[in-house]
Amino acid sequence: MATIVCEALTKRYGAVTALDALDLTIAHGEFMVLLGPSGCGKTTTLNLIAGLEEASEGRLLFDGRDVTWLPPHRREVAMVFQSYALYPNKTVFENIAFPLRLRRTPRAGIERAVRAAAEQLEIAHLLDRRPHQLSGGQRQRVALGRAIVRNPAAFLMDEPLSNLDAALRLSMRSLIKRLHHQLRATFVYVTHDQAEAMTLADRIAVMRGGLIQQLDTPEGIYERPANLFVAGFLGSPPINLIEGRIEDGAFRRAELRLPAPRAEPGREVVLGLRPEDVEAPAPHLVPLAGRVELVSPLGSDTYAEVSGPAGTSLTLRVPKGWRVREGEGIEVGVDPARLHLFDRATERRIA
Amino acid sequence: MLRLGYDERAAALLVFPVVAVLLVVAAFPILYSFWISLHDVVLTRPLRRPFVGLDNYLRVFADERFWIAVARTTVYTVVTVAATTVLAVLVALLLNEAFPGQRLLNALLLLPWATPSVVNGLMWKWIYDPSYGLLNGLLVQLGVLERYRAWLGDPDLTLLLIANAAVWKQMPLAALLLIVTMKAIPEDLYRAAKVDGAGTFRRFLHVTLPALRPGLMLVLVYETMISIRHFDLFLIMTQGGPGDASFTLSWFIYVETFRSLRFGTGAALSYILAMATFLLSYLFIRFLGRRL
Ligand SMILES: Nc1ncnc2c1ncn2[C@@H]1O[C@H](COP(=O)(O)OP(=O)(O)OP(=O)(O)O)[C@@H](O)[C@H]1O
Ligand SMILES: [Mg+2]
């Protein structure tokens, strides 16, 4: 187990700055998820922590010890890859045993550790197979097995579930969560799937362009996005963003008016309204009316594309039990406390 | 009668010329030389060529020169194939890394391969030359050698020196083939092995080498097939000598056929060599291929 501290960690590839002075402290036993769009530096961060790439600047500390220049095999971290990276010529048993063999673990110890890991991952019946005889989910379990036999200080996972189909991804997700509970080790998990990030993480670091945009618990990131990028990146369907101004304690855009008592007047802002933050109209709610353009039923929920006031186009979750039809009018209630306001120039959240 | 659709008929028509040419230039000589190997064909007595069954083959097996040739061919082939393979792996490992000048080196690598083998033979013959050879000059100037030596005249060295010339020419293609195989190894495997704690040598042993197996087999089969039949280098450099030091099977075939003009036994020898090549390749594929 380990506390991992990145201090102004920077990685440049020629003119490209893949990671820009990253400061990140990952607590002992924490499940940290790095979330962000393609090319934002997630893999780079993981490679630096693993020692697969050398930092251009900054320091990396494990439990207070400077490991910035330590080679991968002296860092005691295990890694799981999107491509599984199993040794194709070795059996499942030998794949899992490989790190132990390299450490000259006694034969009996290897046997015991591999069996135990295989039991835990429910792949004990596959030990004699070779990787090409396994399904994707089974392969990723073997890769997990190879990581856990070593009892590493930290687990680094780079989009481990991205190559699996949706159903399998769900069950593997809970398997990984269970492993984290059992092992109580530090996990650093890279994904660009927000649902994965939300369900797994103790804390999420949302990244863009080599910078951390926000570091918070999943609830914190969802409830209080620090800027427009984070607000837009999390949530499905994505948050509705409406440009406007603050005038006498309200957000204004043409005839649209929503209370915003704490914002300073005259400010150019962007208002964020999550599709799921609308309800049936009620006295304590602000009404919002529009015309339904498109209905998308998803089974559990139904979403409607609504052309709202002031020329806005909004995606709204239709309140439970309602029947809506395209071309008809709709009126919902909005809780002003659940609205998000961002400064239009800085894109930052207005508290 | 086989019924052909329009496409098949057109295809047959288009393929026919090639098949005809192949029949004339490939199938006919193969069958004709087999016919010769069953007859006592001697060019000094062109009109009488009696059928002798397997006599030519039996005569060859009873000839002690045949067994000398088998021994020389074996040594030459084993040395050439082993050296080519090992060097090719090393060169491929080197050229698979990124370093300044790597592209240039990659291009230079192909130079020996592009050299015609007669030119290659002449070049090495000059290098080994007893009176003005580069090797002598170099070693004497470096002080390794006191005076010039007749390299190819040393029966203990001849085969090895010819093998060296062959390796120089053959290694590039083998290395190229292995580089291509190496390029196909996923980078993640190396990264996983690094994190698992494998150093450079272990990564080679556990990731590179297993992945190289198909390429290595191809190299082994191909190099064996061509080395066992090498002829041009022997013709140019030593003509089987000194004594019988480089008296290989293909040289024996040449001497028997074109110097002694005994086409019957020459053809029988050719068939034996062809069968040996075929058998070796089969064994390679059978026993190495199974573990791919
Ligand atoms: N070896 C390299 N050489 C040059 N640039 C690189 C290299 N590796 C990464 N980069 C650049 O660094 C940036 C970050 O890359 P990184 O692989 O960390 O992204 P990522 O967040 O993992 O993206 P993805 O979700 O697509 O895997 C990208 O702009 C990428 O082009
Ligand atoms: Mg990545």
Image (cartoon, rainbow, N blue to C red):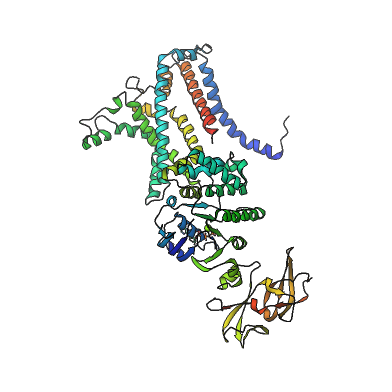
Q: Is residue B171 left or right of residue A82?
A: left
Judging depth in this view, the residue of B227 and A138 nearest the camera is A138
Judging depth in this view, the residue of A229 and B31 nearest the camera is A229
User: Residue A134 sits in which quadrant?
Assistant: top right
Q: Is residue A291 above or below residue B237?
A: below
Residue at 74%, 74% (x, y): give it.
A292
Q: Is residue B255 above or below residue A79?
A: above
Image quarter of the C terminus of chain B: top right
Instruction: Give how far across and how far down residue B62 sits, in percent.
Output: 45, 12
Question: Is residue A89 among what the camera can see?
Answer: no
Question: Is residue A302 among what the camera can see?
Answer: yes
Residue at 28%, 30% (x, y): give it.
B129
Judging depth in this view, the residue of B58 and A275 nearest the camera is A275
In this view, the residue farthest toward the bottom is A248
Q: Is residue A270 left or right of residue B61?
A: right
Instruction: Give how far across and how far down residue B211 sits, in percent.
Output: 50, 41
Instruction: Give how far across and how far down residue A287 sits, in percent.
Output: 72, 80
Q: Is residue A66 above or below residue A316?
A: above
Q: Is residue A234 left or right of residue B162?
A: right
Judging depth in this view, the residue of A40 and A101 nearest the camera is A101
Number of numbered discs overlaid on the protein picture: 0
Image quarter of the N terminus of chain B: top right
Q: Is residue A204 above or below residue B8?
A: below
Residue at 57%, 70% (x, y): give it.
A230
Instruction: Give how far across and how far down residue A225 sits, in percent.
Output: 58, 72
User: Residue A194 sits in which quadrant?
Assistant: bottom right
